[in-house]
Image (cartoon, grey):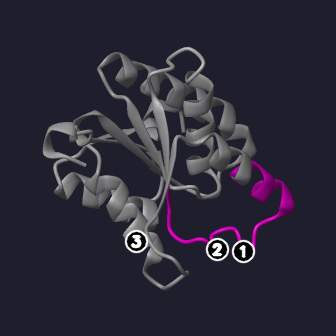
Amino acid sequence: MKQEDYIDTKSITCCFTGHRKILKENIPIIKSNLRTAVVKNIENGYRFFEAGGALGFDTIAAQIVLELKETYPQIRLILVLPCVTQTKSWLKDDIDEYNRIKELADEVVYTSKEYSKGCMHKRNRYLVDHSTLCICYLTESKCGTAYTVKYAERKGVSVINIAKSQDD
């Protein structure tokens, strides 16, 4: 790519991070809060949305972006995956949905070829390092999501926690 063809997409990129385990009864409000936050930021100029491909919030975020592409065709879903074998111990229905999302994504990035102890953190840092906004679902203080949110804050990335929009 020539220098004049390079576009700085970081300023219009939003990443997602959130818990893998979500209570079924919380999913409707999470989806509603997430859809509202994503639409607001599309209207503020965000075009690229990066999801980490994990179960739970990452899957919901990718689904919401794909739904919104019908109304906002200019947006792009980028899956940032930790390794090729991410779904190794998943249930068949979860793998099927993962593969559906992967096929519909505009781009798929693998941050590591094989699973390793640090590959999830590497994926999470990539998400933050390529974004100026992070929309999260954070309800616990000691977990991978909390680490990623703290990393985003240290890097000067704006954070919107949609869990704070809920009545707990």
Residue at the disc numbered 3: 121
**Mark 2 neighbour density, 10 Å: few (under 14) some (14–19) many (20 or more):** few
- For the residues bearing labels 2 and 1, Cβ distance under 8 angstroms: yes
Look at the image and tell me in which quarter the C terminus lies: top right
Badge number at residue 88 = 1
Badge number at residue 45 = none
Q: Amino acid at mark 1?
A: Lys
- Spatial distance from mark 2 to mark 1, Cα to Cα? 5 Å
Q: Nearer the viewer, mark 1 or mark 3?
A: 1
User: What SS does tag 1 mark?
Assistant: loop
User: What SS does tag 2 mark?
Assistant: loop
Badge number at residue 85 = 2
Q: Residue at x 22, y 46 (%)?
A: 157
Mark before the other along the chain sequence, 1 or 3: 1
- For the residues bearing labels 2 and 3, Cβ distance under 8 angstroms: no
Q: Residue at x 66, y 39 (%)?
A: 26
